[in-house]
Amino acid sequence: MTAAVKPLPAWAETVRRKYVGNEASMFVLYGNVFDQILHEGKTLPLVSFLSDVLLAGNKDTVIQFDPSAGVQYLRRLSELPPPSFAPQASADDVLATLEPEVMVRHRLALIVSYAGSVAPPGEENFLGDSDRRAAVRLHRWTLSPALAERDNVVFLLVESLAELNGKIISNPRVAAVELPLPDLAERAAVVAHADPSLPKAQQDRLAAHTSGLRAVQIHQILTPLPAQDGLPDAQRAAFIRGLLGNTPDAAARADKLTALTRGMDADEIAHLIDPGQTPQAAPADSAHTDELIALVHRRKREIIEKECAGLIEFVASPLGLDAVGGNAGIKAELEHIAADVRSGDRKRCPMGLMFVGPMGTGKTFVAKCFARSSGLSAVTLKNFRSKWVGATEANLDKVLAMVKALGPIILIIDEGDRSFGGASEDSDGGTSSRVIAKLKEFMSDGDNRGVVLFILMTNRPDKLDTDIKRAGRLDRKIPFFYNETTQEVQDVLDALLKRYGVAAVDWAVHGEALAAPLVGYSNADLEALVLLAVSSARDEPVSPEHLAQAAADYLPSRDSLMLEYMEMLAVFEASRRRMLPARLRDLTAQQVQERLQQLRRALAIH
């Protein structure tokens, strides 16, 4: 493989170096294998890039095998007829027919698309005969010196290594090379190619806001195809011109937005274009770019949530930390962390946070508000487990690759003990241990510091793997407790009343009487109490009397032993003594351990 006229992508240079150095003659290319690659002003699918760029002038024969489309000779100089393939032949039968070509012919490349369908993962005893033979055949090819001696190479294309038979992945003569999502420089080149009319400054801004997207998706956003849904072009253009009015450069902006909003209805367009936020004195190109970025964010969210369907969900909280009542110490800690993240000084940023404490203490709400205050994008990790062999690992690979590409970002894992604790080797065939190992590796990767901030929430940290909780993965353990003082109760009630837009209470007059009976209530209980008061008030403003009646009527559900157990676990896990309530701050480690052991015996927890 000779170097192209223009520099190769980093992954392609890695392939070239390993091939020229005779390190491998079979490559597993995984990750962003279904994207378009921009090279010398043209966008090429991966197979075309391999054939026409990386292998150009070096291979006389290039064969592509797609399990759904069969065999195609992309280049063949021999005058002899190519081999024939039986209709509906199995993958192994196709490989068996191609084997003389691969092992005898010189200067040949074989590209196998969807290689996971040719040699799928799984226990060998449970694989079909064809799948087993295909995996063994590919493995045997790597052991044969014929590949290297004849200057031949095989590429296996998969989205995730978990989709491919482990016999191939573990072979030292096979090189696995990841194709990452486009980095900032590559995205800038794609944006410039998709819309060369944009000034350089606008292209750079759009490149920064398209992190996590493939090149082909950036093209689709900036140069969308005609769509049948939504308003017709002429009607949409007139509607947009009406929205923009006499704002600067309205005609040019309207033309661009008319193309970019195909498929959107009037309400969606009106939500995107807010002329009230575009000052008359604002530069036209700035307003234009802001609209493009708003559209990019909307489409980006749709694309990523669809691509990672059921695996991640974007967090879009309208409230920041100022909406959190009480928890003064926690808010101060998080605001300090947010400032460190925004500063861009990665060495000051923690790798991860663990929010720990009894249920109802506001861990999830605070995490979402923190995401808003920090100014970072945030996603929650959903259920990525699957009953199918290899699918759980493949799902996690996809999520982690996407999250890293979206960085800097917050990854929120709610109920972490359910996501990453519990399952035994026997119950899931070792899937849990492999998932946790991959997660540990990702969480402790120093390259992710300041790029991906984990927030893991749990009320049962004792169910988590101990190694996940160590410093370097979850650097700071932030404990949450029920409200300890009347002032904390007042702060939470005041924040809740403001959030729901009901009349505020004069706390100087009524605060002590209202708050005193509610000390020890969780934030969730206080929210339920406020909503009960709102319901009782009907159309009237909520008064102190309504709150007092609701407090007298409301019965919080309590399992006192289990709640104390969760509370002591929070004390045990906390990374800073000053964040503990005064009544727990001076407990020694031995006292905490002894009380936990007593509670375990009482609750029959093993």
Image (spheres, rainbow, N blue to C red):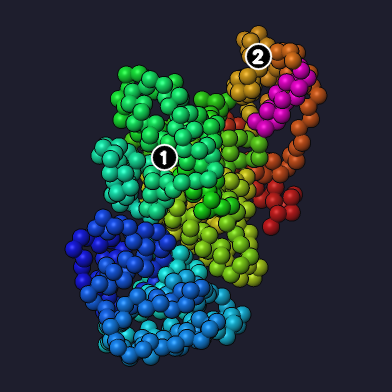
Residue 245 drawn above or below residue 183: above
Quadrant position of residue 145: bottom left
Tell me what residue is drawn at x 27 percent, y 75 percent.
19
Q: Position of residue 579 (x, y in %)?
A: 52, 34
Q: Are marks 1 and 2 in contact (CB under 8 Å)?
A: no
Magenta residues, as a range? 520-538
Res 478 visible:
no
Residue 503 - label? 2
Q: What residue does disc 1 label?
A: 259
* Disc 2 packing (10 Å; few <14; some 14–19; many ≥20): some
Q: CA distance from mark 1 to mark 2?
A: 47 Å
Main secondary structure along the magenta-highlighted residues: helix
Residue 375 drawn above or below residue 444: above
Res 538 visible:
yes
Tell me what residue is drawn at x 66 percent, y 17 percent.
502
Tell me what residue is drawn at x 50 percent, y 81 percent.
91
Q: Position of residue 317 (x, y in %)?
A: 54, 34
The kind of residue tagged 1 is Ala
The N terminus lies in which quarter of the figure? bottom left
Provide the secondary structure element on which disc 2 rests: loop
Quadrant position of residue 154: bottom left
Q: Residue furthest front?
A: 234
Tell me what residue is drawn at x 33 percent, y 47 percent.
194
Q: Position of residue 390 (x, y in %)?
A: 55, 68
Provide the secondary structure element on which disc 1 rests: helix
Residue 555 drawn above or below residue 203: above
Reply yes or no: does residue 445 show up in magenta: no
Q: Camera-side residue: 357 or 12?
A: 12
